[in-house]
Amino acid sequence: MKEANLSDYEKVYKDFDWEVLQSNMTGLPEGKGLNIAFEAIDRHAESELKDTLAIRIVRKNLSYDDFTYGQLKTLTSQFANVLKDLGIVEGERVFSLLGRVPELYIAALGTLKFKGVFCPLFSVFGPEPIFQRLSKGDAVVLITNTQFYLKKIKGILEKLPSLKHIIIIDAEEDLDAQALSFRRLMEKGSEKFSIPPTDPEDPALLHFTSGTTGMPKGAIHVHQAVLTHFITGKYVLDFQKGDVFWCTADPGWVTGTSYGIIAPLVNGVTSIVDEEEFDAMRWYSILEKEKVNIWYTAPTAIRRLMRMELVPKEKFDLSHLRLVLSVGEPLHAEAVTWGENAFGVPVLDNWWQTETGGIMIANYRSMKVKPGSMGKPLPGVIAAVGDVEGENIQIHRQPETQGHLVLKKSFPSIFRGYLHEEERYKKCFKGDWYLSGDLAKIDKDGYFWFVGRADDIIKTSGHMVGPFEVESSLMKHPAVAEAAVIGKPEPSIGELVKAFVVLKAGQLANEDMELELIGFARKSMGPAVAPKEIQFVESLPKTKSGKILRRLLKARELGLPEGDLSTLEN
Ligand code: ATP
Ligand code: MG
């Protein structure tokens, strides 16, 4: 096996300098700046990678739509010209409402070339969440298909005066004056496009957060974020020449754009996209057939795979897999070790957020994995835990002390604003630090451990309990498939720890099981932290990106308003 790109973490961390990295990027010709799409496509299309497969989309019927770097260059230039011909102005926002089809990728990269701001929406949203986002994002162009246009868009158009053009990918002819045929527009669009001068600080992407803790926020990212995409691709995903990479996330979430589009292309590897939703057997066959080397997925998918009896590496040839990675939620220690048996490689957890634009804390291929830990900060990222004191952060120097997870704001992909929420944006920063909203601990070896979201923390009998700790310990019980823990107000102790548990198939949800689980948790965690109440449920409420919605469990438990449910999974 090839040596890892990041073979000596400590040394690289010590010497890392973003300015040196920026000066080593190709950059637009004649020193005209730094543009994500140029780094991702055009520079490769002019190199020996021209005929290399850049993106392979596996369609629902398992046929392929393949694009080389050379072909992508032409198609994205045509799309940039489409925007130009429509009279769109640089900086205006282009939204997409599409499944994982070729036009989504062409539009995303073409918009970045043109210097529009791209905002991908998850295609299963209904009209109301779509309206909220198009309206908040001042969308000028929307690219979608006929079905979505008729079912989800037509009815809200009247309320969207700034939306000028709708581009319909499957219409042979224009549907009306506003809804135009993609094919027609592309035919007219020239194949040559010269990327305008791009300042690294020019806005590039707008991403809405998952809405786990409340109303989704619109995070603004700039072209300079490409430095993070590039270097995390090298160090965390360990991209090497000739690699085949598959990120299962939809571009409607930041992972599906930063890692489902940009990072693999910037690193010149081949990226697999599956048009279909989660399907264990289909996924395993894609890993086998496409000879995937690096696979990036999420805890919710891993938990589903773990529930099956199947050991994939016994049924499928997964010998090409070098790395399996996960992001989005805490990854339980069991999942890390399960991976070793199931795939032949451990599942490597990493932590980041819509706001950070790219991976910030990670387990690296070359570093010892401590199952249950998020790993260590990316070279170039300074992370710490501390307490908020007025307008500053008091950093904890003592290992194992729980505190707010904070990052020095000096990395290129930090968001530059919450759209139309300046105050909220400002509140995320204290001095030089960005306050992530998560709580964590650092152990004596410098590994970071997730405790919980600050909003989810439970205060019980003078203890601060992170739901992750309790959930992880319940997950160790062989009958438990999934668990979510909340704090329920209880005057004598502040809050009572309550767990919602999904049992594995064939397990009986009864009082004996409840006592068994409470006893099991008390033994491993102690009576102060173990749940006092357990409720068995068929499934847990999740966001469409697969995150457990603890705030909804809590609201329902307390009979409070359920809040924004636009991202609730069906
Ligand atoms: P919102 O901000 O709207 O409430 P969200 O925070 O879930 O939604 P994202 O930006 O998609 O939106 O998710 C980032 C959050 O996901 C992190 O702040 C963290 O709470 C959680 N997360 C991501 N990766 C990990 C991980 N490896 N371990 C633990 N938590 C993680
Ligand atoms: Mg968040």
Image: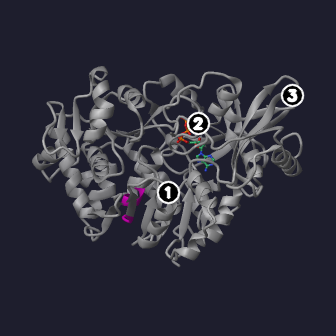
Q: Residue furthest left?
A: 188
Find out if the beta carbon at label 1 lies less than 8 Å from the nearest ligand 1 atom.
no
Farthest bottom residue? 1
Q: Mark 3: which amino acid?
A: Ile
Foreground disc of the pair 1, 2 = 1
Q: Is tag 1's residue or tag 2's residue first in the polypeptide sequence? A: 1
| Alpha carbons under labels 1 and 2: distance apart | 23 Å
Q: Position of residue 495 (x, y in %)?
A: 80, 29
> Ligand 2 is located in which of the four quadrants?
top right
Q: Which residue is mark 3?
A: 493
Does any portion of residue 91 appear in the rendered image? no
Mark pair 3, 1: CA separation: 44 Å
How much space separates mark 2 and mark 3, taking CA atoms? 37 Å
Q: Residue 232: which disc?
A: 1
Question: Helix or strand or loop: what does disc 1 sit on?
Answer: helix
Q: Residue at x 54, y 52 (%)?
A: 380
| Badge nearest the viewer, 3 or 1 | 3
Give the class, few, some or many, for how many residues have Cα within 10 Å of label 3's Cα (few <14, many ≥20).
few
Relative placement, left or right, of 453 versus 41 is: right
Residue 534 lies in quadrant: top right
Q: Nearer the viewer, residue 187 or 360?
A: 187
Q: Label 3, secondary structure: give it.
A: loop
Q: Report if residue 266 lies within the magenta region.
A: yes
For mark 2, what is the residue? 432
- In the picture, measured across the screen, residue 206 lies left or right of residue 9, that is left
Q: Which residues are magenta?
A: 263-270
Label 1, residues with CA under 10 Å away: few <14, some 14-19, many ≥20 = many
Give the image quarter of residue 363: bottom right
Q: Residue at image x 63%, y 41%?
A: 540
